[in-house]
Amino acid sequence: MDLLITVLTLLAAVLAVTPRERQLDIRVRVRKFDYFVIAVSIVLVLAFEFYEFLQMHISWLPPKESWWKGITPGNATYLVVLCAAAILGIRLQWAKLTPGKMLTFRDLVEELYWNGSYSELFALLQTHLKSLFKIYAADYVLPRLRARLNPIPSFSLAVVNELREARGMPVLARSAPPFLRRTFSGVGSYAKYWGWRLIRVLPTSDAARVSAREIVRGIFLSPKFLTALALTRPYLGLDIIKLSKNSFERSDFVDLFVKELLRDPHSVLFREIENNQNRWRERYEIAPSNQFLYFILSDVNVAKELGIYKPVGDFIIAYLDGWTRSPKDDPYNRPYDNDFEQTGIWRSPLFLCIRFFDIMVREALFQGMFWHMWLYYMPRICDPMVRNYRLDDPLVEENFEFPTRYAYLLYLMFSSLRGWILAIRDIPPDQANVVLKSTRPAFDENGNIPKCSIKALAQCLYTVLESKNIGNRTKHSLANMVFDIYFDLRASGRFDSYAEVLLTAISEGKTYRQDNHEYQEALAEIFEEEKDEYLIKRNEEHVEYFEAVLNQ
């Protein structure tokens, strides 16, 4: 009895100092079998403690003298406690969340959520996340068995009866349909026939699936949960994305979670972008230690499946719209300086968006992705940048190449687009996503990334040159960057068709029509001012042809 009291006291003391998240985890793991083991252990300990008394009243109990040598009721008590502890320890260590415990798990999750105990909530979810999504998708033994035994899994008996009633036919009974009994033959017919009846008695665990979906839909998509997750356990959010392939809420979660990461300039996404600057030729080296980027971009099919470009692009457009409403507070109209380039830029959501698209599109290009990965977000982002652009800060020098932070970020955007185009020099010419079918910009080739980049670049240049806000020095700098791409493509003689696409796109403007004379005059004027430099550095024939097209 002293041993039992000591053990119970020790257990109470251990539970008192056990972290709350571990206590909650134990509540989820403990099952009926564990209670049975505990009850049997207590009964055996009490039986051995009062063995002499029980032996006097129960005739079939063997005398102590007939026990194994060295084993007595006293030391057998220790053996029972040791075995029970070993069984429970192993059981609890390997136990997982089951449908039977789903209601308890949901109650614990909701309790922690409403109390704001996010550290305990995240620890509990981290432990049982995989099992949670298995229950959500009914990906465990009994549902799979029901599906296998169901001879017509794609039919609903209620739907079949509605169709039969509409045709004036008698409804089917809640058993194997007569037409199935007639068509079944041989051994397989008996298996399917009895399988149809057996699935009706197998438990469905529908309540567990409903609870799992309530957690995913009600907790995982809530703003408070997402904010805390992005701040404290971002890689748990990544695990949720990985495990939620069969979840209807996956796209909503990705959208909301990525926007939360963008909202915080100190989030893991900002940190990983800053830590991912190494490049080899025209491609970034994505280290596995940058877990978020590596998961999404090491295989760009994942990025395409998740539609990761949408939350990033949409967030930045809304972000820039916010500065449109508060132009006096817009930090990007402040003078560009070294501090911004070296430190401030890594806390800028706008820069992060440009760099993220730069990494993603380059990966798509080199991995052979036959899709533009929505690089057309660049012109959509360029529009509000140019709309917000101002030179009214007293410290801004209009004649500088980058008078404002907007000017520098426009330069980075144009540089990214330039990189996506010129990367064709490092890609096999027969790779599907660089094979050019037409030199006409209006001819859509959404699988050709360099051509899509040319079209996006032409739209951005049009937006910049049409703006009344941007100074001439910045316009000239960006336009000359585009002109240089043309001559770089012509230089090798292997990419003349792409050079033709670029020249046509920029000369015709945003709508690919030669009816915007103001834009075309601005374009020709800028080139005319720099023509002598191009004649010195570039092929004279190419320069003359370029000028002739611009002046048409």
Image (spheres, rainbow, N blue to C red):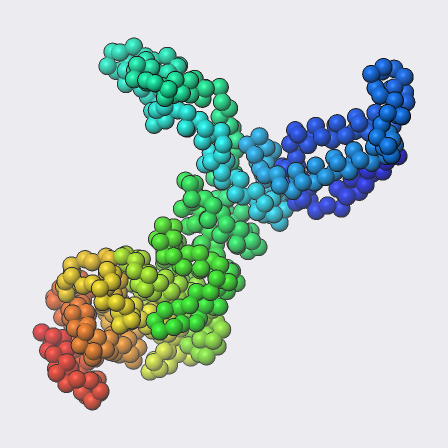
Q: Nearer the viewer, residue 128 or 73?
A: 73
On the rendered image, what quadrant is the C terminus found in?
bottom left
Q: Is residue 479 visible?
A: no
Point out residue 108 in the picture as x, y percentages from the top left corner. Answer: 61, 38
Q: Nearer the viewer, residue 422 or 405?
A: 422
Point out residue 420 in the picture as x, y percentages from the top left corner. Answer: 30, 68
Asked which quadrant contains residue 137, the reply is top left
Left or right relative to 30: residue 254: left
297 vs 153: above or below: below
Left or right relative to 495: residue 14: right
Question: What residue lies at 70% left-to-right and 28% top-to-bottom?
Answer: 36
Question: What residue lies at 36% left-to-right and 69% top-to-bottom?
Answer: 283
5 vs 167: above or below: below
Left or right relative to 157: residue 439: left
Question: What residue lies at 29% left-to-right and 79% top-to-bottom?
Answer: 477
Q: How many marks can you see?
A: 0
Q: Nearer the viewer, residue 512 or 428?
A: 428
Point out residue 264 in the picture as x, y percentages from the top left corner. Answer: 50, 59
Asked which quadrant contains residue 166, the reply is top left
Q: Is residue 282 visible?
A: yes
Left or right relative to 123: residue 451: left
Question: What residue lies at 42% left-to-right and 17% top-to-bottom?
Answer: 194
Point out residue 121 in the picture as x, y percentages from the top left corner. Answer: 60, 45
